[in-house]
Image: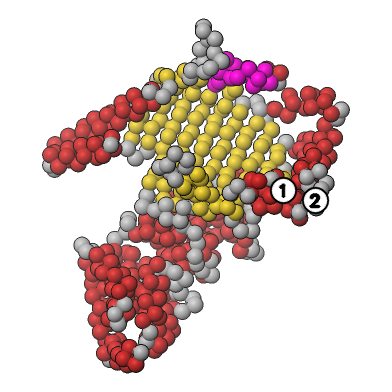
Amino acid sequence: MFRQTLAGAVAASMVALGSGPAAAQERGRTLELLGNMVRAQLVLMLRGAVEFTYESLSYDLHSGATATGVRIYPRLDWLGQDERCEIVIGRMALNGETLADSMSQVIEVTEVTVPPVCLEEEMRGTLGQLGYEGLAIDTAVLRLDYQLSSAAARLTLQAAMRDAVTLTASADFAYFGVEGLFEDDPRPTVLMSGVELSLTDAGLWSRVEPMVGGMVGSVDAIPDMVAGGVMQELTRGGQREISPAGQAFVDSLGAALGQFVAGKGRLTVRAAPQEPVWLNADVFDSPDALVEALAPVVSTEPHSAMRVLAPELLRAALSEADGLSEAERLAAGRALMSGIGAPRNRDAAMKLLVPLAAGSWNAEAAMILAEGLAAAGRMDAAYPYALVALAGGMPGAGALAGRIEGALDAADMLKAQSVILAAFPEDPDLAARRAEVIANATVEGLRKLAFDAYLGRSVPRSYPTAYLFATLAAAAGDQASANLRDDLDRMAAGRPELAAAFAEMAAEAVRIWTEDGLGAAMHARIAGQ
């Protein structure tokens, strides 16, 4: 209700203010006022849930909210009458982006201090034994990326506890939803494709090691003890055979723990099942079922988000040395384009990836280029690679191509589609498939080519090609194709270049129908059925 009221106020204000320099200044003041209104409403709403103060708070309708000097005073059951819990956060930011087919949300906190009084007695005692006065978190960042179209999601968390441990975690979902969201008992519907969790020691182990060593005699015994205990759990006390996935998990766990106690300082658990797994009651029914479904492996390798590109590979990539394999070019190009694993340098990334995307039609390289160039605001350069990635079936390419199209002129969009279609290595300009579809003279063939060209499904997206074959299939009475043709007409409204391209395709459809004999063939086929 609040957002609807605000949207109405914005619309009414903009209409009333009109245009011109004075109106522009007034619009700026109005938007500032509306921003202040949103900020005030946000503060009051949050104070209804918890007591807090802050030094500064900025809010922008596009970039979100950022607060500094935040002090939170939660009411906790274990606090005495004269005790007060005060959690201090140096900086807190909440921002995100919502597009036509995707959304992202980021929550970030830095310089967080949680004094002992804010912790339950058991945790307070444990931390005290380890020499910690409460909790001190240098930074914590939680990010959710969600594809509205496919329901795919990625959740990442990175947190650093001062003088203790750094946690890096990620979970990838092929489908993430909530069943019964508006009912009393909502239930998550989760199809997991992978999860990864890494703990890097930053001082905690040096405090824990003497305690653990005193209990078990020597930390060198830990790997065998833990692996043996897990083996007992997975075999239900030796009553059943362990699965191959279970054996791999136990073996990797023992080896990784051995390296950790020897000084490696990191433990990472990765689960990447060959096929996505529905996380339902059956999977969580027993530890062995969970391990068999997810096939986790333990190592001391860094989390994939923290891997740094090998120096020799980066040097070879930057010097444009010959002899790099396709996999090496992809790895170096991805790191340079994203800035993860190497300092971001999009121009250097393009030198590595463009030959793969343009020369070999490598869909993965094209997707990296499209995402990186779009993030840099270079939509005209990103679009051709988005088309290659889309034709290659890369996840998310359709949403990315659609977002880029919204920022392009119709002329630039059509030119890119024409160039990519002509360069399609399997069938330039789809000449062979067009001839085959027309020769076969079936509604199904005409319709399929229309929709394939419209969606970029296994062929480069081409709206003119989609219009042509949708028009031909519609002429034979296919309602779905008629709807697609009409949708494309609506897309062309107010875009003369697109309308002209479709008018040319309409004329071509008449020629094919009358002069190439498609109309006669369709008439004979339908009459004979």
Tag 1: amino acid: Asp
Which residue position holds label 2?
A: 240
Placement of 176 over or under 58, stated as above or below? below
Which residue position holds label 1?
A: 288
Residue 387 location, x and y as percent? 43, 65
In the picture, which quadrant includes the N terminus?
A: top left
Work out whether mark 1 precedes mark 2 in sequence or the reverse, and give the earlier one. 2
Identify the residue at the far right of this view.
217
Quarter of the image where one finds residue 430: bottom left
Placement of 462 over or under 349, stated as above or below? below
Magenta region includes residue 84: no
Placement of 498 over or under 396, stated as above or below? below
Q: CA distance from mark 1 to mark 2?
A: 10 Å
Residue drawn at (40%, 42%) of the image? 182
Residue 97 location, x and y as percent? 39, 44
Q: Nearer the viewer, residue 278 or 363?
A: 278
Tag 2: amino acid: Arg
Any part of residue 25 in sight? no
Q: Nearer the viewer, residue 244 or 115?
A: 244
Q: Which residues are magenta?
A: 113-127
